[in-house]
Image: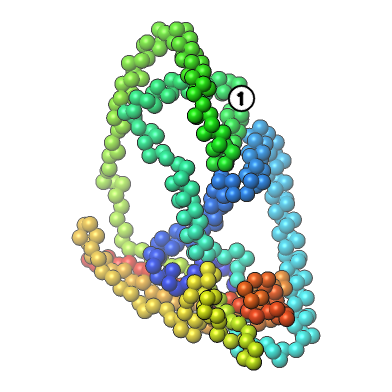
């Protein structure tokens, strides 16, 4: 058994072939950040109200007690992480010693000796999960962010809206201060997508009396402000109007900003994952003959049917020739190489007691209630096969 200490991107061959290597590499590097951003969108849409409410109070605490958090909070968080890592190492060592002692005492008659075994990284990055997180972020952005024309310079309504909002903005800055402003803005961002906020805002927007009083109050404040500072306001009116009505500057492109590449090489480390599924039949034992309306004998982590490990073959070397906009001929070579000599069973859950010594997990008739040992209600089982591969893409410029 070997332990995989490197960071790999878990996927399957069908997904890897449809994505360019450069995009693949970017997704692999940004996978953890995309996951954190997707989890934050869950907080914004109030998928779990208790978690979102906790973030609201946490943000208020951070903004009102910033200095205390910087002095005491960050060192305490780092100390908690060190203690957790130390306990994790100790528990893992103890479980490994217990598993080795149990393996020595038990018989290995029923153990498959013709398969390789390995342990995956603690938190491998999955391409399917990363793409789902991107779809989740894009859906939230499309539903709640409509800023396409928010900063149009030629829109007079924005200038009028600024005149109405600026007194309130100035008053809030004087009353709350910078910490209070950040706290108020963060709270509004966190609660703006909650269901009760939508109901309250809809009721207030459709209240004619409240809208009339707010408009009258704002007009009175604007009139008082203009009368008090009229000479300065009159002097600056023409400058502000000219600035608002002037078109935005057009970006200029310089020759120095355009760079040409003499060629590149992109190398990506991947882990192919395949799940083997079997069902128990009376008189036949465990076979790959499954029911018609359930999963296939070989699937990926999303239960989509894929080819088995025996038929899993890497694509041949692929060459493509193209010309760029400067009519320079370039040759791109895309090559796949196996890093492991053969497929191996993922034994990561053995130390936690989630799989047996052959990597199987046993479930009921609906593939649920998974356990490491078969019981009287165990009619299905599954295990995960892995194999490491490298995707190498090189590009040459033909002179």
Percent x, y for residue 90?
76, 65
**Secondary structure found at label 1:** helix
Task: Answer whether residue 237 is visible to the viewer in this image.
Answer: yes
Using the rendered view, name the quadrant where residue 232 is placed: top left
Residue pictured at 79% horizontal, 85% vertical: 105
Q: Which is more toward the observer, 141 or 254?
A: 141
- Residue lying farthest left? 327
Residue tagged 1: 176
Q: Looking at the rendering, in which quadrant would you find the N terminus?
A: bottom right
Name the residue at 70% across, 54% down. 81
Q: Position of residue 305 (x, y in %)?
A: 48, 75
In the image, is residue 172 above or below residue 336? Answer: above
For the point 26% across and 46% down, the residue is 255
Placement of 103 over or under 33, stated as above or below = below
Residue in front for this viewpoint, 399 or 7: 7
Up-down relation of residue 198 to residue 122 (above or below): above
Q: Nearer the viewer, residue 187 or 144?
A: 144
Q: Position of residue 4 (x, y in %)?
A: 59, 72
């Amino acid at each position: 058994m070997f332990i995989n200490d490197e960071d790999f991107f878990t996927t399957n061959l069908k997904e890897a072939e449809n994505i360019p290597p450069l995009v693949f590499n970017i997704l692999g590097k940004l996978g953890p950040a995309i996951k954190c951003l997707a989890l934050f969108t869950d907080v914004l849409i109030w998928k779990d109200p208790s978690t979102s409410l906790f973030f609201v109070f946490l943000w208020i605490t951070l903004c009102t007690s910033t200095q205390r958090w910087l002095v005491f909070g960050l060192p305490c968080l780092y100390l908690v992480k060190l203690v957790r890592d130390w306990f994790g190492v100790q528990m893992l060592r103890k479980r490994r010693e217990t598993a080795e002692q149990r393996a020595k005492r038990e018989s290995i008659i029923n153990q498959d000796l013709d398969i390789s075994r390995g342990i995956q990284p603690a938190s491998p990055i999955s391409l399917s999960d990363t793409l789902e997180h991107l779809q989740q972020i894009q859906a939230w952005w499309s539903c709640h962010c409509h800023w396409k024309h928010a900063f149009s310079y030629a829109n007079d309504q924005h200038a009028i809206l600024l005149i109405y909002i600026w007194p309130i903005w100035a008053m809030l800055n004087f009353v709350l201060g910078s910490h209070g402003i950040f706290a108020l803005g963060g709270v509004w961002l966190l609660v703006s997508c909650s269901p009760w906020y939508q109901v309250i805002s809809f009721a207030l927007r459709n209240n004619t009396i409240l809208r009339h009083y707010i408009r009258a109050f704002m007009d009175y404040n604007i009139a008082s402000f203009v009368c008090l500072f009229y000479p300065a306001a009159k002097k600056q009116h023409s400058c502000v109007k000219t600035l608002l009505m002037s078109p935005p500057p057009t970006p200029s492109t310089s020759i120095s900003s355009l760079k040409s590449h003499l060629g590149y090489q992109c190398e990506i480390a991947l882990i192919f994952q395949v799940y083997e599924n079997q069902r128990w039949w009376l008189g036949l034992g465990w076979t790959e003959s499954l029911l018609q309306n359930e999963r296939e004998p070989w699937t990926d982590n999303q239960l989509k049917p894929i080819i088995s490990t025996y038929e899993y073959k890497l694509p041949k070397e692929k060459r493509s020739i193209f010309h760029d906009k400067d009519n320079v001929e370039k040759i791109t070579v895309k090559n796949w190489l196996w890093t492991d000599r053969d497929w191996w069973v993922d034994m990561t859950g053995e130390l936690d007691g989630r799989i047996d010594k052959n990597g199987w997990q046993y479930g009921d008739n609906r593939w649920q209630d998974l356990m490491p040992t078969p019981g009287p209600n165990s009619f299905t089982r599954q295990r995960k096969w892995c194999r490491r591969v490298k995707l190498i893409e090189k590009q040459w410029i033909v002179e």
